[in-house]
Image (cartoon, helix red, strand yellow):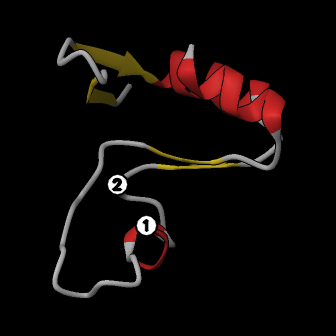
Amino acid sequence: MAKLQVRSLSGESKMLNDKTLNDIRGRLRGQVVVPGDSNYDEVRQIWNAMIDRRPSIIMRCTGTADVLQALQ
């Protein structure tokens, strides 16, 4: 079982296991991408190529409900 370390906006660090990550994916209509996913490098790129960040989790929200779930 893989674990993924994430940090909240407040700076709190947490470990997510596969079950928790699958629960998150199940609650969002949009896409959830993490390092190791085949499209991670493509999704993490932003318009300014000078910035090279590697977020622990990317939530591509498709609406207000997804945004609310992502913030939780």
Q: Nearer the viewer, residue 3 or 9?
A: 9
Q: Looking at the rendered structure, which numbered label has been put on residue 35?
A: 2
User: Could you say which quadrant of the image residue 51 lies in?
Assistant: bottom left
Amino acid type at circle 1 is: Tyr
Q: CA distance from mark 2 to mark 1?
A: 6 Å
Q: Is residue 25 above or below residue 16?
A: below
Q: Nearer the viewer, residue 1 or 16?
A: 16
Amino acid type at circle 2 is: Pro
Q: Looking at the rendered structure, which numbered label has been put on residue 40?
A: 1
CB atoms at circles 2 and 1 under 8 Å apart?
yes
Q: Is residue 70 above or below residue 63?
A: above
Q: Residue at x 38, y 19 (%)?
A: 16
Image quadrant where one finds the C terminus: top right
Report the number of discs: 2
Q: Nearer the viewer, residue 58 or 25?
A: 58
Q: Is residue 14 left or right of residue 65?
A: left
Residue 19 in percent (x, y) is at 55, 17
